[in-house]
Amino acid sequence: MHNSQPSRVLIAGCGDLGCALAQRLLADGLVVHGLRRSHTTLPDGVQPLCGDVTQPQTLGQLAAINPDFLVYCVAADAQTDADYRAQYVDGLRNVLQALGDGVRLRQVLFVSSTRVYGQSGDALLDESTPALAGDFGGQRLLQAEQLLGQLPCPATVLRLSGIYGPGRTRLLEIAGDPERWPRQNAWSNRIHRDDAAAFAAFLIQRVHAHAPVAACYIVSDNCPVPLHEVLAWLAGRAGAPASQRDMQPVAGGKRLSNARMLATGFTLRYPDYRAGYAGLLAR
């Protein structure tokens, strides 16, 4: 980095994805502060902060850090409207207020979800497609995204598709048991945790280089695919007997385009489910 002082990054919600991002930022020479509710050990080099985004009185320490970048990547505790509102909408507002409403930030990255697209069908959706949330989760994420439009600093929304990777093995468990396969074969989209973290770090590097960064990116791999195809491939790789359930015609789900993400010059380490799950199976 060209600055005499390394940039400071605050990762609010420094869980699995946040820790993967933190390690990349540290390797790039940045100073990283990780905010969590508990005193769980963070990766070496991350400066720990204990606070709850839903409890503003626990966030008084944030202003003293004076970060250049905020990465907001909390996770909901429960699939309820109240929890999504508390974590994503109220929590983001609380953190921004603790940081002086963003007046000294160079950039905010907000980790959202492609859940904001409630549409289904074969059409390829991209960032120009209107986000028509189909449930409370998508609605609350959109509400949080809209808060960013009121900031004096640039902000970028990262709409992640289904995250998988180390410790996220639900599909691996389902694949070997045909009775657990979803009855409906729908389009599915995914992003490996390490690619999601790498792209966020890549965007922070672009800000440093004064390169353009868009206000929104769909963060997904190159391969929207019918879910039954993924399950059949996983079952075969794991040596499970061939599924007795025929792959149903695709009905529902959505197909997502990552063209804007790739246009930045970013390269996926895991461009499709085969590359990503092969690494997990090898472990």
Image (spheres, helix red, strand yellow):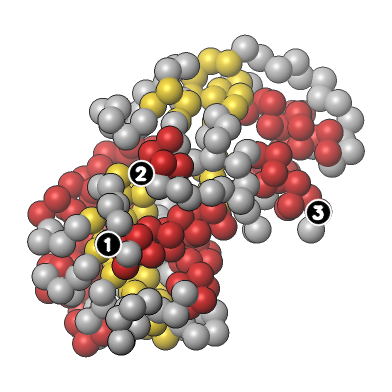
Q: Is residue 270 above or below residue 2?
A: above
Judged from the image, the secondary structure of the residue bearing numbered disc 3 is helix
Q: CA distance from mark 2 to mark 1?
A: 18 Å
- Asked if the residue under mark 1 is in contact with the one under mark 2, i.e. CB atoms within 8 Å, the reply is no
**Residue 121 placed where, x, y %?**
44, 17
Q: Is residue 94 above or below residue 4?
A: above
Judged from the image, the secondary structure of the residue bearing numbered disc 1 is loop
Quick check: 228 left or right of 220? right
Q: Amino acid at mark 1?
A: His
At 45% from the left edge and 48% from the top edge, which residue is drawn? 265
At 36% from the left edge and 54% from the top edge, which residue is drawn? 111
* Mark 1 neighbour class, 10 Å CA radius: few under 14, some 14 to 19, many 20 or more: few
Of callouts 1 and 3, the N-terminal one = 1
According to the image, label 2 marks what residue?
Answer: 217
Of callouts 2 and 1, the N-terminal one = 1
Q: Is residue 153 above or below residue 24?
A: above
Residue 73: image quadrant is bottom left
Of callouts 2 and 3, the N-terminal one = 2
Judged from the image, the secondary structure of the residue bearing numbered disc 2 is strand
* Mark 3 neighbour class, 10 Å CA radius: few under 14, some 14 to 19, many 20 or more: few
Numbered label attached to residue 161? none
Q: Amino acid at mark 2?
A: Tyr
Q: Amino acid at mark 3?
A: Ala
According to the image, label 1 marks what residue?
Answer: 210
Q: Viewer-proximal residue, 22 or 73?
A: 22
Quick check: 266 left or right of 218? right
The label nearer to you, 2 versus 3, is: 2
Numbered label attached to residue 282? 3
Quick check: 227 left or right of 17? right
**Residue 142 placed where, x, y %?**
25, 42
The label nearer to you, 2 versus 1, is: 1
**Residue 18 placed where, x, y %?**
46, 66
